[in-house]
Image: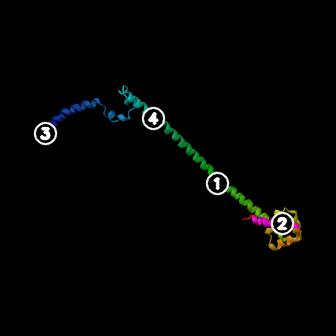
Amino acid sequence: MHKRILPVLGLILVLPVAVVAARHVDLPRSLFAFAAAPSTLMEGCFDVPEAVAMAGELRDRALRIQTYTEALEAKKAELAQAEQTLRARLSELRAVQTSGQTRRSQASAAVQDDINRLVAVYDVMKPADAAQVMTSLPPDFAAEILMRLTPENGARIIAAVEPGQAAILTTHMGARSARKP
């Protein structure tokens, strides 16, 4: 029976003390004291110089970290904007490049068509008439036309050209072939 009386008596004596202590102590505030403002954390510590110096240093560090974090966020936003601008510019440049290549290939095709028509004209001309015209053209242009003619017609036209001019045209034709890889 003694064993049962002691816990009951202890409970009777401790319960009123716990109720009084709970009224005087704010339990949630004491449990979350670490989240309290720094000024309340320093209450009663202003007479300890080390604590004051440490609190000041921690405050300065917190401000530096906050400033650094804000600067990082600003740089991050700036970089995202720059990346977006660069991507847009890259797509514009690719579109311009594609249209430029299309225009160049169209222009090249048009030039090839013009040259083919011109070659066809010289191909049907009489060799003596074609030779007279060829001697009036710049040698590199005349050589280009002669290279595109059928070998038989090209030979007839060169045979109709005076020998000095024929040598120049033949040299340009050989040089053109040597330039091409």
Look at the numbered disc 4 and give the secondary structure of its residue: helix
Alpha-carbon span between mark 2 and mark 4: 85 Å
The residue located at (50%, 38%) in the rendering is 68
Residue 116 at least partly seen: no
Q: Which mark is residue 70?
A: none
Q: Which residues are magenta?
A: 164-178
Q: Earlier in the sequence, mark 1 or mark 3?
A: 3
- Which residue, given by chain and number where applicable, does mark 2 sit on? 169
- Which residue, given by chain and number where applicable, does mark 1 sit on? 94
The residue located at (79%, 68%) in the rendering is 147
Q: Which one is closest to the eye, mark 1 or mark 4?
A: 4
Look at the numbered disc 1 and give the secondary structure of its residue: helix
Q: Nearer the viewer, residue 87 or 20?
A: 87
Q: Position of residue 177 (x, y in %)?
A: 76, 66
Three-letter amino acid code at the position of disc 1: Arg
The residue located at (75%, 65%) in the rendering is 178
- Which residue, given by chain and number where applicable, does mark 3 sit on? 4
- Which residue, given by chain and number where applicable, does mark 4 sit on? 61
Three-letter amino acid code at the position of disc 4: Arg
Alpha-carbon span between mark 1 and mark 4: 48 Å
Q: Earlier in the sequence, mark 1 or mark 2?
A: 1
Residue 30: quarter of image: top left
Q: Badge 4: how crowded within 10 Å, few (<14), some, or many (20+)?
A: few
